[in-house]
Image (cartoon, rainbow, N blue to C red):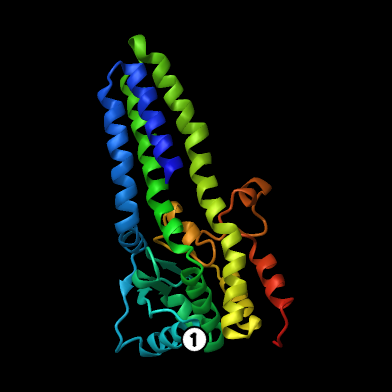
Amino acid sequence: MLVFIGMIVGIGWFLSYQFQDSSILYIAIGASVLMNFWAYWFSHKTVVRITGAKEASIQQYSELHNLVENLAITAGLPKPKVYVIEDQSPNAFATGRDKHHAIIAVSTGLLQDLNRVELEGVIAHELAHIGNNDMLLSTMAVVFVGVLTMIADLFIYSGSSRSEGNNQGAGIIGMLVIVILMPIIGTLLRMAISRKREFLADASAVRLTRYPDGLASALQKISDSSYQLRQAPESAAHLFISDPKRKTSKASMLKKLFSTHPPIEKRITALRSMGGTV
């Protein structure tokens, strides 16, 4: 959060220096503080909205609610709210600022493709994120990356509208920041938060279910699916149990390097090594 504030204030200082307007710096300071406040209290609502998740009816999804409740009791956690995404792509995510304000969302494709043991492994994985306190930072990252994108758009506007006159240099520098730095910063932010935590959540899920092959089989089915989530912004990709844009093994080395998720093949191998029978 402090790094984020520093980045926004630094950009505000640069713009105020280039355009000789100190009010830009004050606006940047205020905006960075407000964004941190918003991200802490309301980022989970932003995630639910941008992913199209809807609260799951207990009458329609009673089995799913029972499964979540039983695993939450086993994990010693309050039952999170349960949401469903109407999409054929099998996937799931957890969000919320703490275990008392947690949400687990699963796609209808996940409910259709997985058997009960496999679904139990996925739910246990998402509960592990809640128990390991991964959610707050991961959820806030959605807002932070969105802000970086907004700043990039402002730089584009600034560079195009001031391409003539004394501020041409500032426009050029702004464009370089957009093209080079902003996408890298956003990707590194999400990657640093997500990749290691996925392995930890897998291991924690196995401790909860005592059956690693259930989650391993679920990950294999998710990997084999040809569907991509229709409503999965890049800024929220790191929240899902698997990359919703399906970076396959044929993806370039550069794309794999900047992926928000470790390769599913490695996760499955790690789970199989924990023991259990297929």
Q: Quadrant of residue 56?
A: bottom left
Whole-percent x, y for residue 217 in the image: 62, 79
Q: Is residue 66 left or right of residue 218?
A: left
Residue 188 vertical placement versus 94 (above, below): above
Pointer 1 local density, CA inside 10 Å: few below 14, some 14–19, many at least 20: few
Residue 60 vertical placement versus 155 (above, below): below
Q: Nearer the viewer, residue 264 or 245?
A: 264
Residue 77 visible to an observer of this rendering: yes
Residue at 34% from the left image edge and 48% from the top image edge: 36
Residue 39 vertical placement versus 172 (above, below): below
Residue 224 visible to an observer of this rendering: no
* Quarter that holds the C terminus: bottom right
Amino acid at pointer 1: Thr
Write down the residue under mark 1.
74
Q: Is residue 44 left or right of residue 89?
A: left
Residue at 42% from the left image edge and 55% from the top image edge: 233
Whole-percent x, y for residue 72 in the image: 44, 82
Residue at 43% from the left image edge and 74% from the top image edge: 106
Q: Is residue 268 left or right of residue 150?
A: right
